[in-house]
Image (cartoon, rainbow, N blue to C red):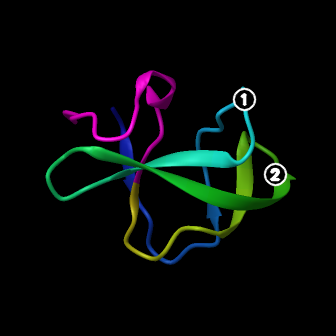
Amino acid sequence: MICQKILGQKWHKFWRNFFSKPYLVYLVQADNTVKAQVVEVGEILPNQRMEIVQGLKSGDRLVLKGAAYLKDGDPINY
């Protein structure tokens, strides 16, 4: 899995669960497991990006690739 550390930026690439709303991202926890997090999205941006307006905070690490195969509590290696 590839993860990105969020450094207070407003724009983030993320994975969307296409089978249901709300939008989900998977946050990487300190023990290298993942936790599903509901986020609110704003604008759709160029280059496969979306604005996240609520649900993330500075320093959150999220899964960018392979998230479609995860569920809450799954361990990851990166």
Three-letter code, disc 1:
Phe
Q: Is residue 63 left or right of residue 44?
A: left
Badge 1 is on which residue? 18
Where's the N terminus, which quadrant? Answer: top left
Q: Secondary structure at mark 1?
A: loop
Residue at image point 14% right, 52% down: 31
Q: Which residues are magenta?
A: 62-78
Which three-letter amino acid code belongs to the residue tagged 2?
Leu
Q: Which mark is residue 45?
A: 2
Q: CA distance from mark 2 to mark 1?
A: 18 Å
Residue 10 screen position, x and y as percent: 64, 72
Picture quadrant where residue 18 is located: top right
Location of residue 73 by image quarter: top left
Foreground residue among 34 and 9: 34
> Which numbered disc, 2 or 1, marks the residue closer to the eye?
1
In the picture as drawn, the residue positioned furthest to the right comes out as 43
